[in-house]
Amino acid sequence: MKYLLRMNIVRMFWVLVLPCVFLQSSQAISAESKHYFCSKDNQYCFNWESYKDAKHQSQLDGKPICLYFTGSDWCVWCEKMEEEILSSSAFVNFATKHLHMVKIDFPKSPNQKHLEPNRYELKKSYDVLGFPTMVFINADGEELARSGFEYGGGEAFVKKLKAALGIHS
């Protein structure tokens, strides 16, 4: 009798614990597959998308795509752009509402996660000669605007970007 009771307890343990383990691991995988970027004050965040996903989503919602070409671990101007513009609340809030963001990184250490698989083709097709470069395109891949680092901070950058993309909100 004690043996049967012990076996039932063990079974109940596995019936209750095993689904929790699988649920936890699937949540970790889905969180890891997302690559978030937040403003300095953590008020706004967006998810870096793959080029393929951004094109698909842009076809559905009509939002432009921002291709951000960077050398994240070696380019001083890229670091400056991320610090002064991309991480500003003004830019992240704008990007969250109006853009699909794609980070196309060319790091010195290529063993990093989240590298766009066709980054060299994109760099060549959009004639990117230096970093940082932001190329704004529509769902068909047509260039709408282009920018590099500019002094003035996030609010000034967003103001110029809205004018270039014809966004009035």
Image: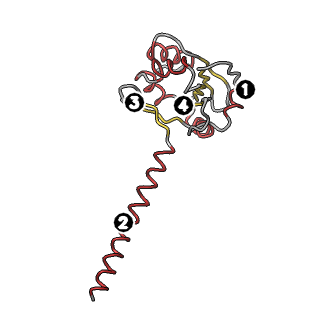
Q: Which label was assigned to residue 44?
A: 3
Nearest the camera: 155 or 25?
A: 25
- Residue at 54 percent of width and 31 percent of height: 101
**12 shown above or below 89:** below
Label number found at residue 17:
2
Q: Is residue 86 left or right of residue 66?
A: left
Q: CA distance from mark 3 to mark 4?
A: 14 Å
Identity of the residue furthest to the top in this view: 151
- In front of the other: label 2 or label 4? 2
**Dots 1, 2 in contact, CB < 8 A:** no
Circle 3 Cα neighbour tier, 10 Å, few/some/many (<14 / 14–19 / ≥20):
some
CA distance for labels 3 and 1: 32 Å
What separation in Å lies between label 2 and label 3 (alpha carbons)? Answer: 36 Å
Circle 1 Cα neighbour tier, 10 Å, few/some/many (<14 / 14–19 / ≥20): few
What SS does tag 3 mark? Answer: loop
Cα distance between the residues tagged 1 and 4: 19 Å
- Residue 164 visible to an observer of this rendering: yes
Q: Secondary structure at mark 2?
A: helix
Work out whether residue 62 or residue 39 is closer to the camera in this orientation and state it.
39
Q: Is residue 60 visible?
A: no
Residue 160 picture location, percent across and down: 52, 14
Residue identified by numbered label 4: 101
Quadrant in which the C terminus appears: top left
Q: Which residue is mark 1?
A: 124
- Residue 44 spot, x, y in % from top left: 40, 30
